[in-house]
Amino acid sequence: MNETIDYQKKMGELKDEGDFERSEWLKTPEGQHRVKFLSEGIPYVAEYEGEKRDKIRFDVESDGKRYSWGISVGITKRSLYGQLLRVATEQAPKNQLVGKTVTLLVSGSGKKRSYVVLEAAMPGFTISEVKPTVGK
């Protein structure tokens, strides 16, 4: 059976370009970063060294600037993806990241890079508990 495409319906499903606004990619050096989610994640597939990886792209704000942030879809609760899922499901409003701000601790580099989302590691965490690391 040949199925035809309802182009009118498909056209109505397309997003305006503003919904997918591209900006510079967030690159987090070692240290502490505040990251505010401006959108929910958009799944995509990226290819690295011939291997396809599932990723999610978010529009975020950090240091007053808008970025795109791509993260790998992890398989553990300790992965960055797992930590963000915890924030999305345990903090009100539940089941969303948009509008939430997280404190991201980055250590290491390359394949030894690790991330800790304080709001996932310490339920009930608030920013007033973070001590500045600049100038120390």
Image: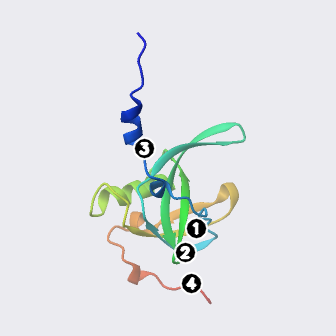
Disc 3 versus disc 1: distance between alpha carbons?
Answer: 36 Å
> Which mark is in front, 3 or 1?
3
Instruction: Quadrant for the C terminus, please.
Output: bottom right
> Which mark is in front, 4 or 3?
3
Q: Earlier in the sequence, mark 4 or mark 2?
A: 2
Disc 2 versus disc 1: distance between alpha carbons?
Answer: 6 Å
Q: Are marks 2 and 1 in contact (CB under 8 Å)?
A: yes
Judged left or right of residue 86, residue 28 is right
Q: Earlier in the sequence, mark 4 or mark 3?
A: 3
Q: Earlier in the sequence, mark 2 or mark 1?
A: 2
Judged left or right of residue 76, residue 89 is left
Task: Please tell me which residue is depicted at 69% across the width and 58% down the height of the picture.
Answer: 110
> Which mark is in front, 2 or 3?
3
Disc 4 versus disc 3: distance between alpha carbons?
Answer: 44 Å
Residue, disc 1: 106
Instruction: Quadrant for the N terminus, please.
Output: top left
Residue 21 percent location from the top left of the image: 51, 58
Which dot marks residue 14? 3
Residue 57 percent location from the top left of the image: 51, 53
